[in-house]
Amino acid sequence: MLRYLERAGLVVPRRTARGYRLYGLLELNQLRALKELRRRFGVELTDVAFAARLRREPALRGAVDTWLAGTELSALDWEQRKHERLLAA
């Protein structure tokens, strides 16, 4: 799990000259906060990793925002057409 957290950029410990990971107070606090976040909101590590990726990659964030806006418009369109059909009947 620690390797996954590092690859996802959620907790990145320092390394020794030989490549061993060093978890200091900062990293331990990040791990505690991540555990609390998961417990409190019921999110998975992949959810948090994706949220972090959205913050790091503006193009991805823009694409997701565009997709979500289109989904909302599609739902509104569908509702509007449904009401128009009901009024026409």
Image (cartoon, rainbow, N blue to C red):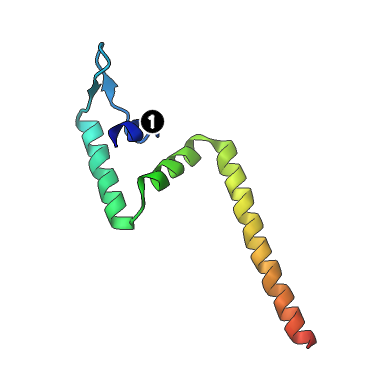
Q: Are there few (<14), some (14-19), or many (20+) residues within 10 Å of tag 1?
A: few
Q: Is 28 located above or below residue 15 in the figure?
A: below
- Name the residue at the left extreme: 25
Q: Is 80 located above or below residue 2 in the figure?
A: below
Q: Position of residue 44 (x, y in %)?
A: 36, 49
- Name the residue at the right extreme: 88
Toward which corner of the image does residue 79 lie, by quadrant? bottom right
Badge 1 amino acid: Arg
- Name the residue at the bottom extreme: 89
The residue that disc 1 covers is 7
What residue appears at the point 78 percent right and 88 percent down from the top-left corner? 89
In this rendering, the count of numbered labels is 1
Which residue is at the front of the view, 69 or 45?
45
Q: Is residue 2 left or right of residue 89?
A: left
Which residue is at the front of the view, 63 or 45?
45
Q: Position of residue 6 (x, y in %)?
A: 34, 31
Label 1: which secondary element: helix
Q: Position of residue 48 (x, y in %)?
A: 39, 45
What residue appears at the point 21 percent right and 35 percent down from the top-left corner? 28
Which residue is at the front of the view, 50 or 26?
50
What residue appears at the point 36 percent right and 36 percent down from the top-left corner? 10
The N terminus is located in which quarter? top left
Q: Is 59 located above or below residue 75 in the figure?
A: above
Q: Is residue 79 left or right of residue 46?
A: right
Q: Position of residue 16 (x, y in %)?
A: 24, 15
What residue appears at the point 67 percent right and 62 percent down from the top-left corner? 73
